[in-house]
Structures are given as C-alpha cells and as structure tokens.
Image: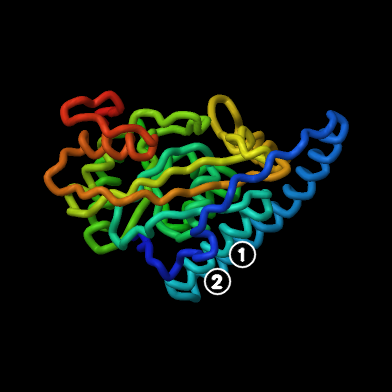
C-alpha cells in the first residue's frame, strides 16, 4: 500500500495563519438553544448526507480515471467542504513539513483526519475498527489509509515496515501515538513503537498540535470523541454546535539521527504538550510500544 506525499503544493495558504480566538458571545436562553440547535443539526446532517454521497461518487467514478495528484486535490477540497458542512472553521500556522516526515499529533476526534487533509492530504495510520463505520469507513479505506489491529503484534510490524518504505521514498504519513482520543485538555503518553519507522528511514519527526475551540473561545466539547460516545452521537453533537474552530499548529521538526524511539516519544510528547522537554533518561511520558 502506498502513502501519498505531503508537499507545499497542497497546503491551503489562506489557512496557514492563526487568527484571534473567537470572541466570547452571550449564551442564549434554553429554549433558543434547543430550537436553534435542533434546526442547525438537522440542516447540517442533511447536507452531510449529500456530501458523503458526493464523496462516494467521486471515489468510485472519478478516482480510477485521474492521476494521484488530482485525487489528492479532490481529497483536500472534499475535506474542506466537510468541515464547512459541520460548521468547523479551520485555522493553522507554523513551519510547513518537508516531504518524507513522520507527522505526530495529539488525538481528539475523528474529525482530526479531515482537518489535516483539508490542509494537506496525506496518509494516516488508523485503528482497524474505522473500516466498519458506515460510508465514512469506506471512504477512509480508499484514501491512502493504513489500518492497524491494535491487538496484533504482526499488524504493528507490518505497519512499521510500510511506514519505513513510504518515508524512505519521500512520502509523509501522520500517526496519533496516544493510541486513543482525549478531551484535548492534556496529552496522553506517546507509544514509542511508531517512532522506530522514522529512525529506520532516517527521516525527521514533525510534531503537530491540535485543539478545538467553541463559540466562546474555550476548548470545545462538541468535537471530543471519547469514552462510550458513539460515532453517530459525536456527529450530532458537532452538528448542533453553533461554531467550532479547529486550530492546527505545525511545530518545528525533530531530527531522529542518534536518538532512540523512547527519546523521540518523550521529546515529541513534551513539544506537543507545550511542556519543558525532560532530561535524557527521564521518561515520564512514554508507553514502550
């Protein structure tokens, strides 16, 4: 399976600028929130259904006829429109990644994949369960996604080999080394195994920090996808929200030469968390694999 490369050609330059957080807005009364939110959710979900149908048609009918470059453009445009349909505004900034880097990010929501694809379409490592998601799972599976069975050591080794091959050829891929999603208020320990691919390929690691803000400029609960929340519940919650801002911060790249995967996991975790980088030999934020 090939993974697509990331290049400046596919970055949305207009998105790569941070704006001020959304101004705080007064909270409306309960009846207003309920009625408006219900209508908003119905409208957005109806548009989402049409957008998903459009995506399926493009993948099934257009993808086989066009180049990989055109497919990437289609994916970026489709992802940007998906965010607009769900009321998600994209803001991003920081130094652009170079081809053949391992992008590493905290993980908050299923929306993360489309937020990154809206800036630059690339390959992702995702849990195998996503394949079973209705419609969206089918689309994700046909857009350069590498699936990993978290209970299988053989699967992890296969994914690592695929990543080494992709990175060595100058293609980039993004991973979420927390292994699960969080509410965005903290970053879980990073699993070190995926960092070995960057070491073996001799490629840099590119930390990425994600966060979602609500209409008040505070951390959004609407975008969070954790615990027992179902995919449908998550979609409805996001569709009900008046406005959600997805902020993407592209952080300075980290060299891998001469470093262990544990060191890279620790350093990248501290960078994404905005914490002081721990001294060598002190590994409070590492999961060994």
Q: Position of residue 189 (x, y in %)?
A: 34, 29
Q: Is residue 66 left or right of residue 150?
A: right
Q: Do residues under tags 1 and 2 come within 8 Å of each other at their CB atoms?
A: yes
On-image quarter of the N terminus = bottom left
**N-terminal of the two: label 1 or label 2?**
1
Q: Position of residue 21 (x, y in %)?
A: 60, 45
- Element on which disc 2 rests: helix
Q: Position of residue 9 (x, y in %)?
A: 42, 70
Q: Is residue 66 above or below residue 227?
A: below
Separation (CA) of disc 1 from disc 2: 7 Å
Residue of label 2: 62
User: Quick one: label 2, few (<14), some, or many (20+) residues within 10 Å?
Assistant: some
Residue of label 1: 57
Q: Residue at x 49, y 59 (%)?
A: 16
> Front-most of 243 and 145?
243
Q: Is residue 4 above or below residue 226?
A: below
Residue 48 — which label? Answer: none
On-image quarter of the C terminus = top left
- Element on which disc 1 rests: helix
């Amino acid at each position: 399976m090939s993974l697509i490369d990331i290049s400046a050609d596919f970055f949305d330059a207009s998105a790569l600028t941070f704006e001020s957080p959304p101004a705080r807005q007064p909270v409306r009364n309960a009846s207003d929130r309920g009625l408006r939110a219900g209508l908003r959710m119905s409208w957005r979900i109806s548009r989402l259904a049409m957008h998903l149908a459009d995506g399926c048609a493009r993948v099934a009918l257009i993808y086989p006829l066009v180049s990989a470059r055109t497919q990437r453009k289609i994916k970026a445009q489709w992802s940007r429109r998906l965010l607009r349909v769900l009321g998600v505004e994209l803001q991003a900034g920081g130094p652009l990644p170079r081809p053949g880097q391992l992008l590493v990010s905290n993980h908050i929501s299923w929306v993360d994949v489309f937020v990154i694809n809206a800036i630059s379409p690339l390959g992702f490592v995702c849990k195998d369960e996503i394949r079973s998601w209705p419609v969206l799972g089918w689309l994700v599976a046909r857009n350069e996604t590498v699936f990993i069975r978290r209970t299988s050591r053989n699967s992890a080794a296969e994914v690592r080999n695929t990543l080494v091959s992709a990175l060595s050829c100058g293609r980039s891929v993004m991973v979420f080394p927390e292994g699960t999603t969080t509410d965005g208020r903290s970053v879980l320990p990073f699993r070190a195994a995926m960092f070995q691919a960057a070491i073996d390929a001799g490629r840099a690691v590119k930390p990425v920090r994600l966060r979602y803000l609500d209409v008040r400029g505070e951390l959004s609960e609407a975008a969070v996808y954790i615990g027992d929340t179902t995919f449908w519940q998550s979609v409805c919650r996001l569709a009900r929200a008046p406005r959600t801002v997805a902020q993407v911060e592209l952080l300075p790249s980290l060299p891998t030469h001469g470093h262990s995967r544990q060191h890279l996991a620790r350093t990248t975790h501290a960078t994404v968390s905005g914490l002081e980088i721990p001294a060598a030999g002190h590994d409070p934020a590492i999961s060994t694999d």
